[in-house]
Amino acid sequence: MDLLNYAFMQRALLAAVLVGITAPAIGIHLVQRRQPLMGDGIGHVAMTGVGLGFLLHSSPVWMATLVSVAGSVLMELIRWYGRARGDIALAMLFYGGMAGGVMLVNLAPGGSTANLSTYLFGSLATVAPSDVTAIVVLAALVIAVTLGLRRQLFAVSQDEEFARVTGLPVRALNLLTAVTAAVTVTVAMRVVGLILVSALMVVPVAAAQQLTRGFVTTLGLAVAIGVVVSLGGTVTSFYVNVPPGATIVLLTIAAFAVLAVLAAPVGRRRARTAPGPGDPAECAIPATRAAGDEVGV
């Protein structure tokens, strides 16, 4: 393929594959926790890190990672202790992160909102070798956490109280989920962009859930969708000269629509075979699934 003759496209395709794997891998836990927009909030906060990178002449990827990790920890603390004012505090954190990023980029020597836009919406030509190194290291961390602790993360995402009773460190695992989501956002920002990365974390999972039930099968299908749309969007962006982030997200939504059509007869068949109100199977408590047994994980 012609595009493989270009070094920047080789880097972009590698980044796209890693983004396609990591985004749904952590996104499935955010969907289970009913926090599908957490990635969007982290993306806003990460903009301040990008701005600091420009201002301090350091790597925007690593600086965004540090700032977004700090922001994700703060989000979890607000969720634990914020109570009634938690939503207001989160809104200020999100919008403050966005405003801070724009301000810092403009204060940086030679900085402009044009520079920031490549991080907001993704850019193939700007994926530098140093970015690839950072993306590979961070993606390896995300994959290690989401696979190595999949049972524990699944249990906490499904039912925090049950997980606490079984002896799992719920708060530590919640923090780890938030930090992993923050790292995933910075992995994806060079290809998809900070504004659109949340879609790649959530939509492939929602698409996969239409056809699958078990956690492992849902995760596998979601990752497959993520890789296909990431590669497809990157290649399309090269040949058609359109923004990669927007292309990837539109392809993801298209995949969701296609799977929704395919899932309609499956849903009708499941409805016909579902147990009735008096069926013992309907009354059974899936304790092993909640605990992360191989039935669910």
Image: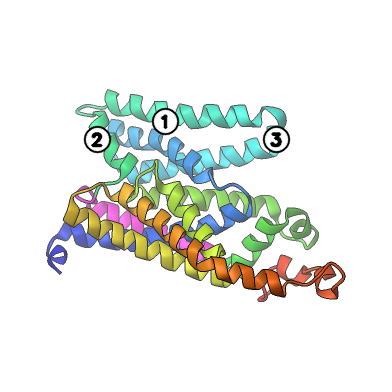
Quadrant in the rendering for residue 111: top left
Q: Position of residue 150 (x, y in %)?
A: 59, 66
Q: Position of residue 91 (x, y in %)?
A: 55, 29
Residue beneath disc 1: 98
Quadrant where the N terminus sits is bottom left
Q: Which tag is nearer the camera, tag 1 or tag 3?
A: 1
SS at badge 2? helix
- Residue at x 65%, y 38% (from the top left corner): 79
SS at badge 3? helix
Which circle marks residue 81 in the picture? 3
- Residue at x 34%, y 59% (from the top left corner): 230
Q: Is residue 110 above or below residue 16?
A: above
Please give the range of residues in magenta: 124-146
What amino acid is labelled 1 in the image?
Answer: Met
What amino acid is labelled 3 in the image?
Answer: Tyr
CA distance separating discs 1 and 3: 24 Å
Residue beneath disc 2: 115
- Residue at x 78%, y 72% (from the top left corner): 275
Q: Position of residue 289 (x, y in %)?
A: 71, 69
- Residue at x 52%, y 55% (from the top left corner): 27
